[in-house]
Image (tube, grey):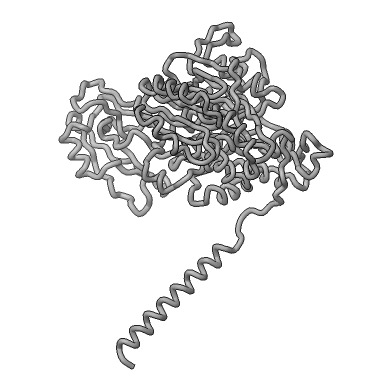
Amino acid sequence: MEKEEYEAQIKALKEEIELLKKKQTYEIKRQKYGLNWIDVPEAFEKDSENKIPILEEVKEKSIKNDDGKPTHILIEGDNYHALQCLNYTHKGKVDVIYIDPPYNTGSGFRYKDKRFIDKYPDGTNVDLNSPLRHSYWLSFMSKRLSLSKKLLSNNGIIYISIDDNELYSLKLLCDSIFDESNFIGLFPRSTSSGEKTSIYNINTNQDYVLTYCKNSDSLKKSHIIKGLVKDFKEYSNPDNDPKGPWKKDSNLIKIDAGRYGYARYGITNPKTGVTYYPPVYYDENNRKQWHYVEDTFNKFLKEGKVIFESEERKNGYAFFIKKYLSEAKKDTSNISSLFLLSNEFQNGNGTKELKEIFNIGNTFPYAKPTTLIQELEKIISNKNLTILDFFAGSGTTLHATMKLNEEDGGNRQCILVQLNENNICEEVTYERNRRVMQGYTNSKGEQIPGLGNSLKYYKTAFIGQNNCKNANDDDRTELAKKAGCLLSLGENTLDEICSTEYYQLFTGSKEATAVYFTDDYEKFDEFKEKVAELAPKFKKTFVYIFAWSSADDFAYEFEDIPNIQIKAIPLPILEIYKSIYNV
């Protein structure tokens, strides 16, 4: 057999082996591993079941402060519908999501099982013994987490508070939605220090913050997670050292048996002649040596970094080595997975904060403290974050965001979503942050000044007679007329300055939005004049025009106006909704 034939056979065998390897890998991957549950269909109100979701502004609840600080968003409604709307306005724009969903402890979680909605129109309370307890919760969470993933930016991070009841199910669910490779960490949090009733005499004083990112490769490259800021208060310069602030470095270090004697030499005080040696411990687990080898110590001695003191220190060694602030390589340290175990992150602090704001107790049970949210936001170096909390509860996330902006000069914008069941959204979420923005009197009778900032209040609403997949021309026409809040929110141009039967105008800090929302073009020339007046005042103006397909045919109408971007409505909205319909 010729050499060429052998080489050809070897090549063919190698290719076959590679194909077999790929097939084996595929077979392994296609095997089902992970979480399985009964996906129980969720019922919604009749008005929303087969209609198209939109947002409507509640103008009387708007808070406006001309202080240059962010305008935050509060959406009243079921978070499932709000997330659908946000998938149009904020797809790929959210940097941080923090949520505190129901823990499914056997009380407080209600699920609307579509199969039994005729018997339980308000839903079923899910108790510990319910055979569908975990299936209800997972069906509830999976839809909302799937929608939230689409909102995250490429460097986006999601934090989820959870306890032992659903931690393990949630981890597997997030592995399937966000991908296991995007798991960042699990951070236990101290919830309380007191004793609780327990049949096993074991207190459960912790819950967890489960953390994922949108794209681990992108997040690593961005270096956006900066770690925890180091405390440099211990550095000072009492002797006016020209090298700058310093602190006393330790002169002893624990050694293992293999390195015993590695740095055990005599250190002589040149003034007193006293020589020091490391202590001799016969316990192998408690052996000590000098922190530095002899050559390094002598080098430090020549540089003046070794200081001999007049009196012996408590450990018996009257000297120390200067460690300069300039030698600290990083101003941050890696984050310990235990960084939330401090008492400052406990629930009791959240309760105290609410009591101070409302002057009454137990306004909202189990409220998280602002320190928790602030610490999670501080980890990220960007101070211009868009932050979303779609289980807003008492509104801690917005309060914490405003406090952090006040501390570090940040420009973080917060979006909250909260159902108004038992008037929570209006009387707790909104009212708390209104007081924080405008000022309030605390339980001691002291006047606490407001933090400023502004807020827009929206409600989810529904239009048309059909869902997005079956929308007819009447549905599309109505959607275009009612899309103003979606469009202005998507462009972050939140202040409506003009509204007619044909068009709307909105402005933001740097950009503007103009919407011609009807197929009756009688007032289109008037609309163009308004846009021509508006556009020069802003960096960019987004012009939305009703069109059955593309808005390209209208481009020539605005070619003389600078900084214009023309878009069509309502089809792009419907296309986004269709892409998430089956979620």
> From the viewer's perspective, is 492 left or right of 259?
right
Taking the view exactly as shown, the residue that stands out farthest to the front is 522
Q: Position of residue 499 (x, y in %)?
A: 54, 20
Residue 16 vertical position relative to residue 515 in the rendered view, above or below: below
User: 278 or 203: nearer the eye?
Assistant: 203
Q: Position of residue 295 (x, y in %)?
A: 19, 44
* Side of 511 where 146 appears, left or right: right
Identify the residue at image location x=65%, y=19%. Answer: 427
Residue positioned most to the left: 302
Q: Where does the N terminus fall, quadrant-wise?
A: bottom left
> Would residue 550 be found to the left or right of residue 231 on screen?
right
Picture residue at 51% right of the left edge, 20% below the top: 496
Residue at 45% in and 27% down: 412
- Say if 410 sits above or below 150 in the image: above
Q: Is residue 210 visible?
A: no
Report x, y in % for residue 87. Answer: 54, 38
Residue 489 position within the rendered picture, expressed as x and y whole percent measured from the top left: 51, 28
Residue 275 picture quarter: top left
Residue toward you, 574 or 26:
574
Circle count: 0
Considering every residue shown, the one lying at the far bottom of the view is 1
Q: Is residue 127 above or below residue 23?
A: above
